Image: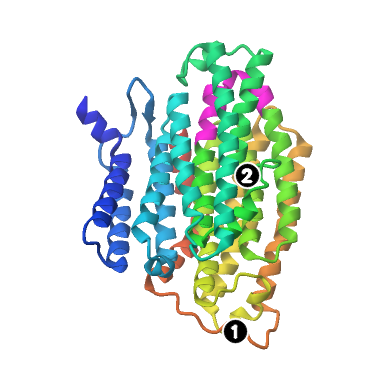
């Protein structure tokens, strides 16, 4: 029915409306960037309320598009993260001469992620993945006066094209074997043959590229360093969150008959991702590259929850990504504010930062402590539930869980490097006092509150657990 279309796709339709609104504004007389940003933030806030009105479970187009209360919640996490990015980077966006074009690309990528999460068909899945990726490559080039930004966009588009080719080859193998593209049909026809496994490996490799799983991570640090900070934050949080959400569905709904192979691949890639991510993070001096390798190590923990393959694993991944939105965007927000005001992006530049910027220093410190998993911050509870779910599966290996836990200790060291520079190291010329602006301050307060409280408010995890059943 037509009414089902408008009800079940209300979030996608809202994002489409925003894209067309931006297009009409660009084609018309235009409005001031400040007014446009205020309008966009208002529409994003209204979008967060949409799941609370109307039906939240069903399918459209012969189940090519599917949704559920959990999927609506996942999309709301991405919406919240996008709203926070717009607020944290208000000054950079306000000054940009091509703001409408940037926002059109941003919301096009977000729309692709929404369709990606709701995919019930491999064809829609592929088209959604491309829609969510290509605009990000263009956004990476939006530091128009910097050559390194063009290099980042080139590396992004080349790596995306390569992974898309691998994905298409995997999809073609799967379709040739089972004769269907529908998610609910494929697991009934998979038998675990060699060709099944080859098709799955190609399919999973494309996910590994998008998530920056080792050894498919080589593009990540260069793209983060060259991209504008809002784009790096969007890649780190929103893009990876969307791919993690659909990966849960694909692994344990579509390829459920290949569970043993899936678990073995996840164990190997989890350990490689955690160890390599942590070791390379230790060596970084540029904060954007540091946060790139930090995000790679965080993906390793997400893979632990995905490896569980049960309700607790699904809930723990969604819960962790919610926490990750607050913690990682809090850190990215401070880096963005400082970079916009001073142009400084290295760890050494932050020596003595606390002397003149106490508020920003505390936001940065608590965000990094949350990413490290220090109790009682939310990141500790997020990682605790991920490890708990990974240890609770019947295939769980004690040595695997032990190595994962030890990597939490390693990560604490490199997060403490930054905190030491901010609070303890001396600098004869520390960064002068920075006024972030009311929009950025409000977003930082939200990130700080999320990093402090989400883990302590038990009903949040229970609510996610109930949605996952």
Asked which quadrant contains residue 365, the reply is bottom right
Q: Nearer the viewer, residue 169 or 62?
A: 169
Lower sequence index among marks 2 and 1: 2
Per the image, the residue denoted by label 1 is 355
Tell me which segment is drawn in magenta.
Answer: 246-262
Q: Marks 2/1: CA distance?
A: 36 Å
Q: Residues within 10 Å of mark 1 (few under 14, many from 20)?
A: some
Q: Is residue 362 left or right of residue 128?
A: right
Spot occupied by residue 188 in the image (x, y as percentages of width and height):
52, 12
Q: Is residue 356 left or right of residue 391?
A: left
Q: Nearer the viewer, residue 55 or 106?
A: 106
Query: How many marks on residues?
Result: 2
How are the colours assigned in the image? rainbow
Camera-near label (2 vs 1) is 2
Per the image, the residue denoted by label 2 is 212
* Residue at the image point whose x is 51% and y is 61% from the top: 228
Q: Nearer the viewer, residue 356 or 105?
A: 105
* Residue at the image point whose x is 70% and y is 50% from the top: 277
| Secondary structure state at the residue bearing disc 2 | loop
Q: Let me know if residue 258 is in the magenta part.
A: yes
Spot occupied by residue 21 in the image (x, y as percentages of width and height):
25, 51
């Amino acid at each position: 029915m037509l009414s089902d279309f408008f009800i079940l796709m209300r979030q996608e339709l809202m994002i489409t409306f925003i894209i067309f609104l931006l297009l009409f504004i660009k084609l018309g007389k235009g409005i001031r960037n400040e007014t446009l940003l205020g309008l966009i933030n208002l529409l994003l806030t209204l979008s967060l309320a949409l799941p609370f009105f109307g039906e939240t479970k069903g399918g459209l187009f012969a189940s090519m598009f599917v949704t559920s209360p959990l999927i609506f919640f996942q999309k709301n996490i991405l919406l919240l993260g996008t709203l926070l990015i717009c607020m944290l980077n208000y000054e950079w966006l306000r000054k940009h001469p091509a703001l409408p074009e940037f926002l059109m690309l941003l919301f096009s990528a977000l729309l692709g992620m929404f369709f990606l999460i709701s995919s019930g068909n491999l064809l829609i899945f592929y088209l959604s993945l491309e829609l969510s990726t290509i605009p990000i490559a263009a956004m990476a080039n939006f530091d128009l006066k910097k050559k390194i930004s063009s290099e980042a966009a080139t590396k992004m588009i080349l790596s995306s094209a390569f992974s898309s080719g691998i994905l298409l080859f995997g999809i073609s193998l799967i379709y040739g074997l089972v004769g269907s593209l529908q998610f609910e049909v494929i697991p009934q026809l998979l038998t675990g043959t060699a060709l099944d496994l080859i098709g799955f490996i190609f399919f999973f490799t494309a996910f590994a590229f998008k998530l920056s799983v080792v050894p498919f991570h080589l593009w990540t640090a260069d793209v983060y360093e060259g991209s504008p900070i809002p784009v790096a934050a969007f890649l780190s949080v929103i893009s990876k969150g969307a791919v993690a959400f659909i990966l849960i569905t694909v692994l344990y709904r579509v390829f459920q008959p290949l569970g043993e192979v899936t678990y073995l691949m996840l164990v190997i890639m989890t350990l490689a991702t955690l160890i390599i991510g942590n070791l390379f993070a230790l060596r970084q001096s540029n904060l954007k590259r540091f946060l790139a390798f930090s995000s790679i190590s965080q993906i390793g923990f997400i893979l632990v929850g995905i490896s569980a393959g049960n309700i607790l694993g699904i809930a723990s991944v969604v819960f962790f990504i919610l926490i990750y939105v607050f913690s990682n965007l809090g850190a990215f927000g401070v880096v963005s504010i400082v970079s916009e005001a001073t142009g400084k992006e290295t760890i050494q530049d932050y020596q003595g930062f606390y002397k003149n910027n106490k508020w920003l220093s505390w936001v940065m410190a608590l965000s990094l402590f949350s990413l490290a998993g220090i109790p009682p911050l939310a990141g500790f509870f997020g990682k605790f539930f991920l490890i708990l779910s990974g240890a609770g599966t019947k295939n769980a290996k004690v040595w695997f869980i032990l190595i994962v836990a030890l990597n939490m200790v390693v990560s604490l060291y490199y997060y403490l490097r930054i905190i030491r520079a901010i609070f303890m190291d001396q600098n004869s010329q520390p960064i002068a006092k920075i006024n972030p602006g009311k929009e950025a301050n409000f977003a930082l307060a939200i990130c700080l509150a999320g990093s402090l409280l989400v883990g302590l408010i038990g009903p949040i995890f229970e609510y996610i657990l109930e949605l996952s059943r």
